[in-house]
Image (cartoon, rainbow, N blue to C red):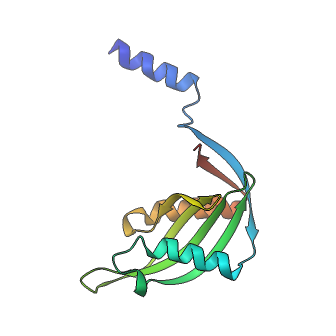
Amino acid sequence: MYKVALFLVIAAATGCSGGTTKVSTKSAALEPGEVFWAKNQLAVQTAMPGVARFQKFEIMALSNGDRVYCGEMSAVSRAGISEGFVPFYMRRSAGAVKAVNTSQDSADFSAKKCAEARSGALRINKV
């Protein structure tokens, strides 16, 4: 019990940031090449990438140089069943995807992260 309490005190003292940092965000222009790249990265996360559809697609520039992509994506399972439009969140750094959430299971998380990004500030993992 003492070790657990000590761990909690140390965690609280160090800020429990979980290795995250806060960055500012602003809306970015939808450049066709970047949109094409991002949609392809998101589509390959699905069972059938060729039938993925997007709506409400937006890009935000982060103060650390990363980009965040938000919107809604409709995917189809291998059984051919549409999952409907689900919120997605993806962050890239220098052309590499650092975080991606496209499933129904992560829809609430994706919607929350995108709302944060739209508000002008976002907490991201230090990578």
Q: Position of residue 102 (x, y in %)?
A: 44, 68
- Please state if 98 lies on the left or on the right of 116 as rendered: left
Query: In the image as oriented, which residue stretches furthest toward the top?
Result: 2
Q: Is residue 19 above or below residue 98?
A: above
User: Front-most of 115 and 28?
Assistant: 28
Identify the residue at image location x=57%, y=22%. 13
Residue 111 in sight here: yes
Image mark count: 0
Q: Position of residue 18 (x, y in %)?
A: 53, 37
Q: Position of residue 118 (x, y in %)?
A: 68, 64
Q: Is residue 9 above or below residue 39?
A: above
- Please state if 94 lies on the left or on the right of 18 as rendered: right
Residue 84 in sight here: no
Identify the residue at image location x=48%, y=59%. 109
Identify the residue at image location x=61%, y=63%. 115
Identify the residue at image location x=46%, y=76%. 43
- Please state if 102 lies on the left or on the right of 59 as rendered: left
Q: Quadrant of residue 67?
A: bottom right
Q: What is the quadrant of the N terminus in the image?
A: top left
User: Front-most of 76 and 107?
Assistant: 76
Q: What is the quadrant of the C terminus in the image?
A: top right
User: Front-most of 38 and 70?
Assistant: 38
- Please state if 17 lies on the left or on the right of 3 as rendered: right
Q: Is residue 23 above or below residue 109?
A: above
Q: Position of residue 73 (x, y in %)?
A: 48, 78
